Image (spheres, rainbow, N blue to C red):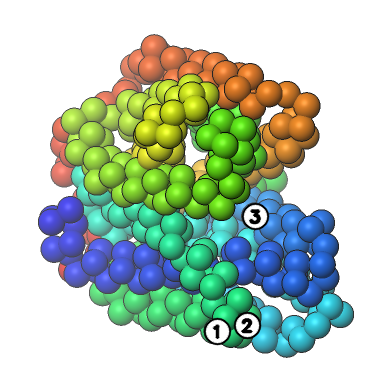
Amino acid sequence: MRRLFAHRDARTYLAGQSLSVIGDSALWLAMGIWVKILTGSNSAAGLTFFAFTCGVMLAPVSGMIVDRVRRRPLLIAANLVTAAGVCALLLVHGRGQVWLIYLVMFGYGATNSLISSAQTALLTQLVPGDLLGDANSVLQMSSQGLRVLSPLLGAGLLAWVGAQPVILLDAGTFVVAAATVVALQLREPRPDRAAPGRGGWRAEFTEGIRHVVRTPALRRPMVACLIAVSAFGLFETVPFAVVSQGLHRSPEFLGVLVSLQGIGALAGGVLAGPVLRRTSERVLIAGGLAACAAAALLLITALLPVVGLASAGLGLCIVWINVGAVTLIQRRTPPQLIGRVDAALEFAIVVPQAASIALGAALIAAVNYRILLLAMAAVIGFSAVYLATRREPDDRNAASALQQADSMPRESAGTF
């Protein structure tokens, strides 16, 4: 981490993006609550998150854009456009303008996908190859750790003084994020504007997923993640039953478990870089999946300390899986494909995760939550074993990755 923050550009960019997370998380929960206040409908409030998810579904298009233009000006424009879109929420004054909230949240999801893919690609030029894992760890620590407090900040401001401060806070953080990208000293090369290969735009559109399929080092971890995410969505509903039926506490106690999850995420971010340097991305992902399966088993107990440990374990596993997956993409994908590969992974995960969330909401009313936890542990545990027991011929640890990075030309790297 000291080496990472010694780089001016890395320090500047990571600070700006960490601040942006505060606004993102504050707005996310506040908009659902606001729609509930305006309409009195739980279904209408739930459509807020559905609109965001629909926007994320445009990820494949975002990936194509990221790979066809310079990532730095794209990030500046995307952050400023999102800030302007968020400010449109200031026009909402009653139930009749709820449609505008849905529209803004749809755009929010689309630009979120665009910024995520552009960021994944830009980091490969912003930091040395051996520090990519540390940079991704910092972003995950801010994303998962700050979300413990920032949703409460958004909900608190909404209840105290209304929606306007939450909207302005989020818009302001996007402006700051854009400003930090402007401040970078990175000399970004021109993108490869060569015409798409045979197949035209369809081939270009699907090249990201085709690269994953034909690259063994990427294919097996991504299959393992897809298997796991088919059960992971149940964590959105099962914890309510853990709190009420297992711990016999009020629903508000879930906030304590979420806070413990944030602590686990911070610990996971600190440990992810050292573990990655000593092993490989595949091992980090497999370790995260194994921790997730263990956490599901521990949640079956009715012992508060054990459930608390499981909650912290969930935070750690999310960070390890995300850091391992993103770093793997960055190190095993040609620069001109990173946007499409990252977007393809995001799209492939969002669909089964959304389905598993819906399935969990339906099953929790008819099936004992302990049975669901056992099923989740079995599916996620299988994905960990599937990944850990299959070593690919080109699997490499951090030391060999560093040697390869040092042997590559650095003309595209940033000036710090």
* Displayed quadrant of residue 356: top right
Looking at numbered disc 1 in the image, what kind of residue is underneath it? Answer: Pro
The type of residue carrying mark 2 is Gly
Mark nearer the viewer, 2 or 3:
2
Nearest-to-viewer mark from 1 and 3: 1
Q: Quadrant of the C terminus?
A: bottom left
Residue 405, horizontal then vertical, whole percent: 21, 43
Residue marked by disc 2: 162
Q: Position of residue 42 (x, y in %)?
A: 79, 58
Q: Is residue 54 left or right of residue 399?
A: right
Q: Which residue is mark 1?
A: 165
Say which residue appears at 34% left-offset and 76% top-offset.
Answer: 180
Q: Residues within 10 Å of mark 1 (few under 14, many from 20)?
A: some
Residue at (39%, 29%) from the top-left corner? 306
Q: Which residue is at a point 53% across and 35% down the rendered structure image?
A: 247
Residue hosting label 3: 56
Q: Nearer the viewer, residue 399 or 50?
A: 50
Please name whichever residue, 367 or 266, is drawn nearer the observer in this view of the structure.
367
Q: Is residue 160 above or below residue 265?
A: below
